Image (cartoon, grey):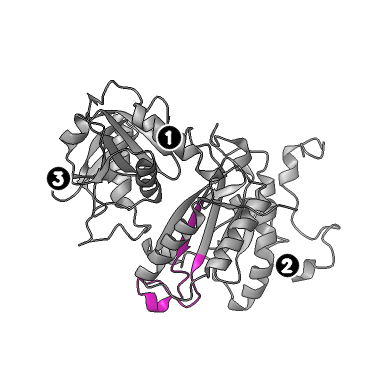
Amino acid sequence: CRDLDIPYTANMLSWKSGPHACDGPWAEWWYHDVHNSTGWSIKARTAPQSKYRIMNPSLMPALRVSMPAYLFLASQTHANIDQTPKDAYEDPRNANLLVWVGPPGRGQLVPREMAGVSPWDSSVQGGDACWEGLRVYRGKIMSLDKHLRRLFHSAKALGFVNVHTKEEVTEAIFRTLAANNMRDGAHMRLTLTRGEKCTSSMNPKFNVYGTTLIILPEWKPSEGATTYDNTKGISLISASQRRNSPATLDSKIHHNNMINNILPKIQANLAGAADAVMLDVDGFVSETNATNLFLVTDEGVLQTPHADHCLPGITRQTVLTLAKELEIPCEERRLSLVDFYTADEVFTTGTMGELTPVNMIDGRVIGNGSRGKTTERLQDAYHKLPERPGWATPIPEFG
């Protein structure tokens, strides 16, 4: 009524029983209780009805056809009621995104509020999926080939079948970026699930439809509410949970079984820290719940834990490569919390947050409590990589 500038009165929600002049030619096919009703509420119906109604199978085709239109109209009914928490989106453009969802050959772009996967999808049934994060800089996608290589290695290790091709995934990425007009300052989360099942089960033999590809693009700065402060730095705590080993679940598979990461993140949130340092089963540092870790000794040596109990991150390997170019001594070795407590510098690495200085771990101030010179040198070198040949994939022009 407000949108149409019609004065609202309470009697609009009730009426007299029996036929009405406005019924139209279809009235005789209405359910028998419609003419007996006097309002919208269940109490207004004179004929008693169970709220547990049987669905006639013959009506399924009509339901499938009408449901999308009904859901759209229902969403418009509540369009003027803002159910989104205040400041939910760091960038307001993220309220109107198109995301990619679908199996091989049948993926499509849909508005974020309409996107979804089947409740029979393996990601829902058992967290059975692998994923990658991609960053877009100045018209290029950073390390795209390396990320796709790891995605398909993970899918192979998990035994996925009827998998999207690399060309299909790449095309879907470009189409998603184009639809959202994203060429800079964006991040994408790629998820490849084992796909939809024909019945509820953890058994992969019931996956008969092929993998499901999900691409979630967002306007997301490398420093912000959902990432870190790469100048002032962050604080960490040590987690009570141990990082899973290859004996239980190999982190070289970039899988979606994230509870081992989420529980330490909850600890960090409750402690007011950015993230939590996770140890391996022998008590040595593995990584944080979200990123790889580096330290710089008082002798200027860059050190990072072996990638045995942690993800061998792409940004981690990039930093090792840059360190050699910059003639910074570096080594991979077993490191304890004490090594990190007493280091001159500590920083984390990851695709989303890039290189982030750490100024405190478990209440111990790292170095002088501010970003170190080695960290800053590596950050500067990293920021220049998209313009260097071989480090980033150009995004096609949009029409």
Q: What is the span of residues highlighted in magenta in the rendered image?
A: 189-212
Q: Is residue 194 above or below residue 301?
A: below
Residue at image position (33%, 53%) is 312
Q: Percent x, y for residue 277?
A: 26, 40
Residue count near mark 3 (Cα–Cα under 10 Å), binned few <14, some 14–19, many ≥20 = some
Q: What element carries label 1?
A: helix
Which mark's residue is nearer the viewer, 1 or 3? 1
Mark 2 or 1, nearer chain start: 2
Q: How many numbered discs?
A: 3
Q: In the rendered image, is residue 110 in sight?
A: no
Q: Is 211 one of the magenta-colored residues? A: yes
Residue at image position (26%, 24%) is 367
Name which residue type carries label 3: Gly
Which mark's residue is nearer the viewer, 2 or 3? 3
Q: Percent x, y for residue 181?
A: 67, 47
Name which residue type carries label 1: Gln
Residue, disc 1: 379
Along the line of sight, the residue nearer the viewer: 347 or 131: 347
In the rendered structure, the answer to whether residue 92 lies left or right of residue 328 reads right
Residue, disc 3: 283
Q: In this view, does 8 lie above or below 231?
A: below
In the rendered structure, the answer to whether residue 209 lies left or right of residue 13 reads left
Q: Is 113 one of the magenta-colored residues? A: no
Mark 1 or 3, nearer chain start: 3
Name which residue type carries label 2: Trp
Residue, disc 2: 30
Q: Percent x, y for residue 217?
A: 56, 49
